[in-house]
Image (tube, grey):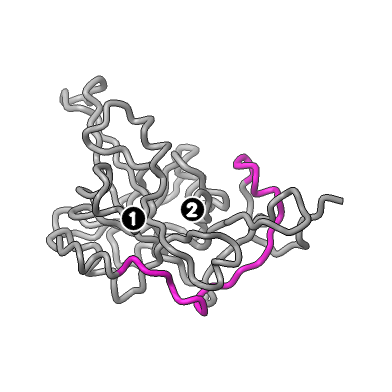
């Protein structure tokens, strides 16, 4: 699975990189805590937090923030999202929670890198590892999204409040990631973005052809501090290379 990642690139740069209209407000004096947090970068993104998402809506490619953890439109309780942070590439087109969004509501989750925990022979504690791109460009995690309407809470116009949420698709690892973990996020190359985001494209077999491991040569891996284990820790030093953990 992919349960923790890094989102440090500012949204204005992400909108340029992914050629998407920026739907979040630039940072300013009146920012709330969450907006300021996003502008500063999140080095320990965790499930149920708001994350940046690239998606298409009404013919426009947009960059916005959705909650990480898919809440299907038919869900009775939004808490179900905490259990659906990932969708398996092998079955996404079959599962009730994901097959509708996979056909019509695909997205990209930009990430500067992600964490996985490696079992170390002779050690009780797992070693956290940071995986990022060789060239420093953001990863484009493949994902799907949906909208859940809260009938118990209405806006000023009397309409149900809407919750936009998303999940990350994971699949088999490449040979480099396999040394760390048995799954990895599906990472889309730039030449796949247009087809992937096109909501008029519902060719399931064609779309499933994108759900393959990214080439190993595009990824670099190094050990990081166990400080990342605590989701309350959030600072740039979390991604710095460190000496491997020791039980001693």
**Residue name at image x 52 percent, y 57 percent:** 8
**Residue name at image x 38 percent, y 30 percent:** 79
Pointer 2 local density, CA inside 10 Å: few below 14, some 14–19, many at least 20: many
Badge 2 marks a residue whose secondary structure is loop
Pointer 1 local density, CA inside 10 Å: few below 14, some 14–19, many at least 20: many
The answer to whether residue 108 is above or below residue 227 is below
Residue 191 lies left or right of residue 141; in this view the side is left
**Residue name at image x 55 percent, y 66 percent:** 178
Residue 2 marker: 2
Residue 125: give x, y in percent of width and height: 73, 49
| Residue identifier under label 1 | 143
Q: Earlier in the sequence, mark 2 or mark 1?
A: 2
Question: In the depicted view, which residue is nearer to us: 158 or 215?
Answer: 215
Residue occupying the far right of the picture: 248
Magenta stretch holds residue 89? no
Residues under numbered marks 2 and 1 in contact, where contact means CB atoms less than 8 Å apart = no
Residue occupying the far front of the picture: 122
**Residue name at image x 66 percent, y 67 percent:** 222
Residue 171: give x, y in percent of width and height: 41, 61
Badge 1 marks a residue whose secondary structure is strand
């Amino acid at each position: 699975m992919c349960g923790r990642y890094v989102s440090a690139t500012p949204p204005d740069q992400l909108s340029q990189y992914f050629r998407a209209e920026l739907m979040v407000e630039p940072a300013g004096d009146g920012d709330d805590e969450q907006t300021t947090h996003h502008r500063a970068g999140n080095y320990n993104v965790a499930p149920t937090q708001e994350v940046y998402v690239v998606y298409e809506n009404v013919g426009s490619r947009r960059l916005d923030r959705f909650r990480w953890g898919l809440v299907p439109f038919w869900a009775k309780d939004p808490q179900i999202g905490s259990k659906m942070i990932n969708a398996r590439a092998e079955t996404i087109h079959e599962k009730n929670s994901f097959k509708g969004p996979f056909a019509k509501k695909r997205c990209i989750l930009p990430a500067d890198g992600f964490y996985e925990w490696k079992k170390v022979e002779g050690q009780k504690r797992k070693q956290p590892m940071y995986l990022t791109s060789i060239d420093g460009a953001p990863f484009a995690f493949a994902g799907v999204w949906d909208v859940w309407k809260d009938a118990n809470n209405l806006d000023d116009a009397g309409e149900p409040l809407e919750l936009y949420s998303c999940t990350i698709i994971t699949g088999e690892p490449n040979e480099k990631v396999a040394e760390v973990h048995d799954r990895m996020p599906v990472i889309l190359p730039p030449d796949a973005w247009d087809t992937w985001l096109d909501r008029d494209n519902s060719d399931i077999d064609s779309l499933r052809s994108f759900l393959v491991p990214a080439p190993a040569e595009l990824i670099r891996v190094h050990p990081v501090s166990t400080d990342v284990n605590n989701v309350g820790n959030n600072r740039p030093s979390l991604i710095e290379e460190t000496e491997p953990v020791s039980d001693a």
